[in-house]
Image (tube, rainbow, N blue to C red):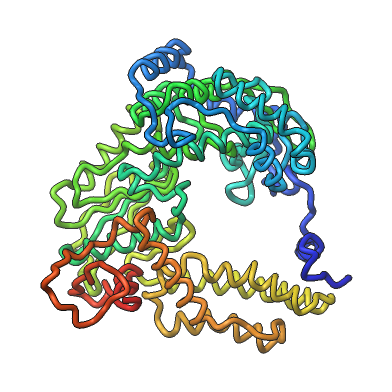
Amino acid sequence: MQKASASDTRQLWQLLRSSRNWSGKKHSHSSLNLSANYCPTADELNSYYASVSTDPNYSSAAVADALNAAIFTSTALPLPLDGTSHNFVPFSSTYISLILSRIKPTSPGPDGIPYWLYKNCAAELSSIVTKLINYSLTESVVPRIWKTAHITPVPKCSPVSAPSDLRPISVTSILSRTVERLIVRNYLTPLLQSDVFNDQYAYKPTGSTTCALIDFTHRIHTMLETSRYVRCILIDFSKAFDMVDHAILIQKLSSMKMPSLVLKWIASFLTDRTHATRLDFILSSYKSFNRSIVQGSGIGPTLFVIFAADLKSLDFRNYLLKYADDSTLLCPELSNTSVETEMRHITDWAITNKMMINLLKTVELVFRRPNLNHDILPPPLAGIERMDSAKLLGVLFSSNLKFTDHVSSIVSICNQRLYLLSQLRRQGLGASSRDAVFTAIIVNRIMYALPVFNGYLSEKDKSQIMSIFVKARRWQLLLFPPDFESLVTTAEYRLFQQSLASNHCLHHIYTPKIKNPDAMELRKRGHDFILPTVNYNFNSHTFIVRALFNFR
């Protein structure tokens, strides 16, 4: 096998794929790893996806009425395109040329126009593309080809034994995705800075799964300061993106003070859509559907965040954390509103908004103080399984707030990848390329969400993680393996500094100090926030508390 140059990224990853015996065949039966008794056709899968995204009680009149009411009552967005006028300002060809030149490699949509054509011919195409985009936005008309999608089935589990085990990822035309991102950037993203979205961490400029989990653990320990246990419900909404009702969505967009022009464009984008499914290089026939916000579209995820914005806990002592369609309820022991009442409230919200909670995938954890007698814990919720551990956003949480099992999982995965890297070394992979692969598939896996649980790790847990770096050095896979402690400190300090900015999604957690001009500060701190009072040692493990004390 030839050596892969560090500068030749494509060759490097082709080498990696071949070493893992990746077939390179996409969307085929073999790549989907279907069970022996399940062998669907493209048309069968497409019919299933269409049935999920179709409401038999759908009324086009309801959507039209919602749009008309929204146009009549909505006011302009306080952050217009040009900073001075609330009316749409047409995009310039210079700006669109810049957008086209920055298109990243991506699959072409149903129109078959590849990304490289837009990218390489940005200057030549900018004039006609600009006219098309401006006409679509000013007239609030979305071309039919932009409302057509090709679905790529992506396995949720292995082996696949039912159509529900395949997630439908829609691929639309590149130009449609470009316009969607312009809408998101100029009109939807500014909305997400509102306090209404403080409990939502997805699709925000500063949001991430790590930030969501930091908020999650911080609130658990804040609650444990006054309660012996905290009940946690990991709520699963069935087919959340596919179940979104367009009329309800339009109403909610209107309540967000969305300009009527944008409302009309979004309504046009959502209605009269069709899709086909590609499997084994065979494209199914096209099917229409009347709900859903299109998984894989540029605008769909942000629309769902707005759709779920009014889903809140009843009691301020409780907390509902959201990351896209993942919703997690926290209820401390001393809350005035029980977890049963909160769940009835969430169920009512789901019914009102035509969503559905999947009780089979909804689970409960009970986080508790150390050494708490199990007899004190409340009985489980009816119909919801109580577990000792469960995975949230890629991190395995245990009810005792120890992460030994999560660390063991990480180490197991990284050991497998170390073996792969050793095989690549034997086949001639150069040192610089090995460094790149090690960082991509091992260091990045270790560092994922590490600020969330780093403070909880025992010395044994840390030694397990550091053993990965020791093996890499012993096997001579790397010339200079990175220092684990330095990686962690750098990552945590960078995140803390970012979160001090007022527009950061974690900023609302910090409690500002009341400044007294007559007071003397014996020691200057690197922030203007109150250092939290820690009554229990385990509270000091959270990122927020550790950062405020360590980076002061």
* Quarter of the view holding residue 541: bottom left
Q: Position of residue 98 (x, y in %)?
A: 67, 43
Q: Nearer the viewer, residue 549 or 330?
A: 549
Q: Nearer the viewer, residue 180 or 468?
A: 180
Q: Looking at this rendering, what residue extends furthest in the top direction?
A: 61
Residue 366 against residue 173 in the figure, above or below: below
* Quarter of the view holding residue 218: bottom left
Q: Is residue 498 visible?
A: yes
Q: Looking at this rendering, what residue extends furthest in the right direction?
A: 2
Q: Is residue 240 visible?
A: no
Q: Looking at this rendering, what residue extends furthest in the front direction?
A: 84
- Residue drawn at (23%, 69%), measured in percent from left and top? 369
- Residue drawn at (47%, 39%), measured in percent from left and top? 302
Q: Nearer the viewer, residue 85 or 334?
A: 85
Please give left or right for residue 169 compared with residue 205 in the image: right
Q: Position of residue 545 (x, y in %)?
A: 29, 71
Q: Nearer the viewer, residue 19 or 143?
A: 143
- Residue drawn at (64%, 50%), measured in percent from left and top? 159
Please give left or right for residue 519 compared with residue 229 in the image: left
Please give left or right for residue 251 compared with residue 437 in the image: left
Q: Position of residue 413 (x, y in %)?
A: 60, 69
Q: Position of residue 258 (x, y in %)?
A: 40, 28
* Quarter of the view holding residue 7: bottom right
Q: Looking at this rendering, what residue extends furthest in the left direction?
A: 518
